[in-house]
């Protein structure tokens, strides 16, 4: 519903997210007129999912024999997990609700507009409110733990069979563990010169062991994926399918039956649109050319 302010000192709206603003002031250069647009409330559906890629190691058949481990990856696989869905309200300029306010000379007010031209505030900078925004998540960097043969010796690479290579790789793992234990207990001929050197050597041993162990146990790589779908809630009254989610494909289109449907239900609890409030229509005609138009949003769950 549109209302008109007959007099004002300052007016500001709460921005749901940080955005660049433009300050405009009435003057001779614009014939003392300020133009702006009113916003429509849209919603960004933010989908937080994880893509998981698992790969079997080349020696997985010998993991129990040489390392005594039974829980291993035996085949390559890729699957998805959905961590959560956030709904973020966003104000988008409505080109059908654009206005020009004319002022007289003297000390005319200034306005702050968004990049799209939406009115954010009058005579004061807009206030940023982050309470309604979704928690910011930093996607985890994919860790490349794919087994590499660079840690194998020439003798191991020259072995005539996979079984022999697995045996020699297992022996190398135990030698690395023994070397690390000797460093920790001080049972070596010469200790590292300082603490930094000690940390570097320990890290190298850990990396070598992790790479060799992955050849038996396999690897798991996790990658956080964020996908955003923008909708107009006013067009989604009732129950509406947003997207489908597949364990093996991730977010898919509504017509892809490989995924399970994810629905959004919008229920209006307070409708203030002019067509539903005759009093507002009368007030709009009466005050058509006075002050500044603004939006009184309705409510929904």
Image (spheres, rainbow, N blue to C red):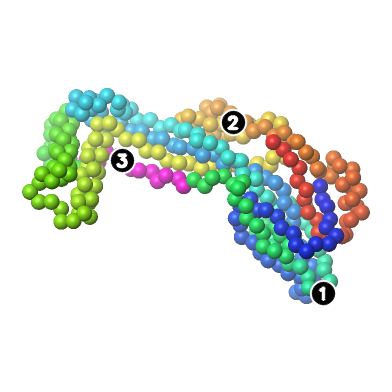
Q: Residue at x 49, y 37 (%)?
A: 49
Query: Would you say the magenta stretch is mainly helix, strand or loop?
Result: loop
Query: Which mark is nearer the camera, 1 or 3?
Result: 1
Q: Examine the image and state in which quarter residue 120 appears.
A: bottom right
Residue pointed to by mark 2: 262
Residue 237 in percent (x, y) is at 72, 34
Local secondary structure at mark 2? strand
Q: In this view, does 53 lie to the left or right of 29?
A: left
Q: What residue is drawn where x is 58% and y is 40%?
A: 86
- Span of residues in magenta: 138-150
Q: What element carries label 3?
A: loop
Gap in angstroms between the C-alphas marked 1 and 2: 56 Å
Q: How far apart are marks 3 and 2 (CA)?
A: 33 Å
The answer to whether residue 140 is left or right of residue 190 is right
Residue where numbered disc 3 is placed:
145
Residue 58, visible in the rendered structure: no
Number of residues whose C-alpha sits closer than 10 Å to that of mark 3, classed few (under 14), some (14–19) or many (20 or more): some
């Amino acid at each position: 519903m549109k209302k008109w302010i007959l007099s004002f000192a300052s007016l500001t709206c709460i921005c749901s997210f940080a955005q660049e603003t433009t300050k405009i002031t009435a003057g001779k250069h614009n014939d003392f007129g300020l133009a702006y647009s009113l916003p429509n409330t849209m919603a960004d559906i933010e989908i937080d999912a994880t893509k998981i890629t698992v790969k079997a190691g080349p020696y997985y058949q010998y993991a129990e024999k040489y390392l005594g481990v039974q829980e291993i990856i035996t085949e390559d696989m890729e699957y998805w997990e959905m961590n959560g869905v956030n709904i973020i309200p966003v104000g988008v300029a409505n080109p059908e609700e654009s206005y020009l306010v004319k002022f007289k000379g003297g000390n005319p007010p200034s306005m702050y507009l968004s990049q799209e031209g939406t009115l954010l505030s009058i005579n004061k900078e807009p206030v940023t409110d982050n309470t309604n925004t979704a928690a910011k998540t930093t996607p985890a960097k994919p860790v490349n733990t794919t087994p590499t043969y660079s840690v194998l010796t020439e003798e191991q690479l020259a072995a005539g069979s996979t079984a022999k290579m697995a045996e020699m790789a297992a022996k190398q793992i135990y030698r690395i563990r023994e070397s690390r234990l000797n460093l920790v207990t001080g049972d070596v001929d010469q200790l590292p010169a300082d603490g930094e050197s000690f940390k570097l050597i320990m890290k190298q041993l850990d990396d070598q062991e992790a790479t060799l162990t992955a050849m038996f146990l396999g690897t798991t790589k996790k990658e956080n994926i964020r996908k955003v779908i923008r909708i107009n809630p006013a067009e989604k009254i009732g129950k509406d399918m947003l997207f489908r989610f597949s364990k093996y494909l991730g977010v898919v289109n509504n017509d892809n039956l490989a995924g399970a449907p994810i629905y959004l239900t919008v229920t209006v609890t307070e409708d203030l649109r002019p067509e539903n409030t005759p009093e507002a229509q009368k007030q709009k005609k009466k005050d058509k050319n006075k002050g500044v138009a603004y939006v009184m949003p309705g409510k929904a769950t």
